[in-house]
Structures are given as structure tokens and as C-alpha cells.
Amino acid sequence: MAVYTHLGAEQLEGLIAAYDVGALVSAKGIAEGVSNSNWLIETTGTRDERQRFILTLYEKRIDTNELPFFLGLLDHLAQRGCAVPATVHDRDGAAWREIAGKSAALIEFLPGVSPGKPTPAQARAVGAALAQIHLAARDFPLARCDDLDLAACTAMLASCGKERLAEIDPALAQTIEVAHAAAKHQPEGLPESIIHSDLFPDNVLMLGDRVTGLIDFYFACNGAMAYDLAVTHAAWCFDRNGAVLHGRLSNALLAGYESVRALQDDERAALPALAERACLRFLASRAEDWLETPSDVQVMRKDPMDFWRRLTVYREIGIDAFAKA
Ligand SMILES: Nc1ncnc2c1ncn2[C@@H]1O[C@H](COP(=O)(O)OP(=O)(O)OP(=O)(O)O)[C@@H](O)[C@H]1O
Ligand SMILES: N[C@@H](CCO)C(=O)O
């Protein structure tokens, strides 16, 4: 479930009336997503044609001070032809408004569905779309630090503690040392842009092999573009539990990326270390959620072991994880 805040019909009508989008026809809560409350909004539109939007109400994880970055980035990328939803501004030109004591934004609805089991053609398309946002974001004027860098993730793992990590699975007892070891060989000085840093299949909308929308930019930050590619590799190129790396998906993702932006030699060489970092990032946030969410609560806990298995693959085969088959 991802509607945490109840909004009554009058509140929704009042909110929509602040925008030049026609009158509210319907508002349906969206079950997917865990961070914010989201509704699919339908309005009468401005030219006798119904229009659809996504209304997002920002819950506690998002700091309102960061909305100029997140929403400004969507508009910046959409204006440059990237497949991302633009924000709808209200009649006063504001990209978000206050409702029920929280901030809310009306965002363009994009068609498409998230691939359940990506194909090489889809991985290729997402690689190209990722490179497009990297190039288009280079002149975005705002900045945001990565609050989930390796140091932060190592601290998260340390605060979970070795014993509690081992309760999830005995293999995880080693994770804190693995994170310290990974920090010693992290590359520096790679080319940067704004990166998405969470481009999992559930954050991509597709129609067939075409990317129709990259969504959920709420972890976007300044960072190495090759790190974003490594995150996307870890998220797209394995079976769901992370035991098997699919070479055809890997080749397709990299080829798609390089069809738009060629990797430098140092970026390519850095991919195994960056992929280890990516695995530690998702392992850490999943382990923390796993330990903090009681097992009887009806929220789907994501298994940290999925990223332990990916990490093991990257540590064992290194650059071969990115080699052409
Ligand atoms: N612009 C959009 N166009 C169409 N559908 C969208 C759009 N934005 C979000 N959605 C739909 O809403 C769902 C929830 O959105 P999202 O994943 O951004 O949720 P969240 O709670 O904000 O983030 P998280 O997944 O990190 O918890 C998506 O799975 C998608 O189905
Ligand atoms: N995409 C992440 C959740 C956001 O941090 C995961 O699958 O663990």
C-alpha cells in the first residue's frame, strides 16, 4: 500500500483547481511504491479531452527543501527530450503546493509498464536512456550530495551490527569487513553528472522495447556516471535473487549505454569496484529495513541476500561481469 495520507474529495478538488488542467474527474490511490503517497488523477482537461496525472504527496523520507532539486531535475530532463515526466506548475508557477500539512506535486502521467523479466532489447533501451539523462543533466544548475555513499552505507551496516546481520543470514556477518575492504579500492576522479542511482526495472516504464518513462528520481544526486551504470547493471542483469548473471542482458545494457555515451577506459576498468559499492548500498538499506520492519507487518521486505549474492558474483569474476560474451 502506498497511500499513507487520506485526502477527502473536497481537498482533492481544491488542489486540482489550483492548476490549469480542468476539473477533477477521479483520483485512485496507487498501491505500488513505499516512500510517498501517490494517486492516479483524471481531469476534464483543458481541450475537452480527459487528461491523466500522477499526484505525489511527499511523506517523511523526502525533505521539502530538496524539492527544487528533484522537481527541477524532472523539468530540466523533460525539456531536453529525455523520457521523464515533467511537473505541472500551478497557476502561480509553483511546482509543488502544501496540502494536509505536506508538500504535493502534480506530475505528467506517462504510459508504459515496468518489465517483470527484462529482455536484452529492453536492457539495451534502458542503457541508452540512462546515458541520455547523464548527458542532459550535465548543465543542471542545482547539486545534491549522495547521502548513501559507501561511507554512509558502511555506517548503516555497522549500526545494524554483526550479530543482527548474521541473524538475517550467517553470510552477512562478513559484510562490514567487506565494505571496509571495498572502500580501499574505490576509484576517484571519474566523470560526473547528476545520476539516478536507483534505476531498477520498477523505476522504468516501457512499451515493448521502448522506454516511455524513467521515474522515481528521489535518490538522484551528483556522482560518477559509471557508478549509475553499475547500479543499473546490478539491478537489470541478474535473475531476481541475484545468483545468476545474464551475459546477454549485460552486453545489451552496456551497448545501449555506449550507443549514446562512450565509456572512458578508466570508467570501464572501475565497473567491478563500482558494482561492489552498488551491491553494498542496496544490501545496507535492505538490511536496515529488514531489521526495522517487524515480520508480521504487511509491507514487502526486500531480501538483502539478493545483493549479497550479486556482490559475490562481482567479487569472484571482476571485470568479466562486464565483458562481451
Ligand atoms: N509519471 C508517472 N507516470 C505513470 N505512472 C507513474 C508515474 N510516476 C509513478 N507512477 C506509478 O506509480 C507507482 C509508484 O511510484 P513510485 O515508484 O515513484 O513510488 P514512491 O513511493 O514515490 O517511490 P518508491 O518506489 O521509492 O517507494 C509506480 O510504480 C508507477 O506505477
Ligand atoms: N530499489 C531499492 C529500493 C530503494 O532504495 C531496492 O530494491 O532495494
Image (cartoon, grey):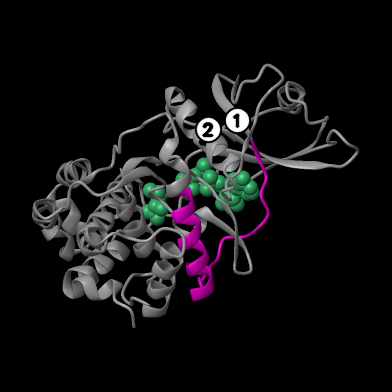
Q: With respect to residue 252, does 229 lie above or below?
A: above
Q: Along the horizontal axis of the image, is 14 left or right of 255?
A: right
Q: Count numbered badges in the picture.
A: 2
Q: With respect to residue 48, does 202 lie above or below?
A: below
What is the spatial separation of the Cα atoms under label 2 and label 1, in whole angstroms? 8 Å
Residue named by callout 2: 71
Kind of element beneath mark 1: strand
Residue at x 15% of width, y 57% of height: 175
Residue 147 drawn at (x, y percent): 29, 37
* Residue closer to the observer: 245 or 89: 89
Residue 302 drawn at (x, y percent): 38, 57
Residue at x 30% of width, y 48% of height: 285
Residue 42's disc number: none
Tell me which amino acid carries mark 2: Leu
Residue at x 48% of width, y 68% of height: 123
Residue at the extreme right of the image, as rendered = 48
Specify whether residue 1 is in view.
no
Tell me which amino acid carries mark 1: Ala
Q: Along the horizontal axis of the image, is 43 left or right of 191?
A: right
Start and end of the magenta stretch? 107-133
* Residue closer to the observer: 204 or 153: 204
* Residue closer to the observer: 7 or 18: 18
Kind of element beneath mark 2: helix
Q: Is residue 218 magenta?
A: no
Residue named by callout 1: 105
Say whether marks 2 and 1 touch (CB < 8 Å): yes
Q: Where on the picture, by quarter, is residue 50?
A: top right
Q: Where on the picture, by quarter, is residue 139?
A: top left
Residue at x 48% of width, y 61% of height: 128
Specify whether residue 139 is in view.
yes
Q: Is residue 126 magenta?
A: yes
Residue 56 drawn at (x, y percent): 59, 35
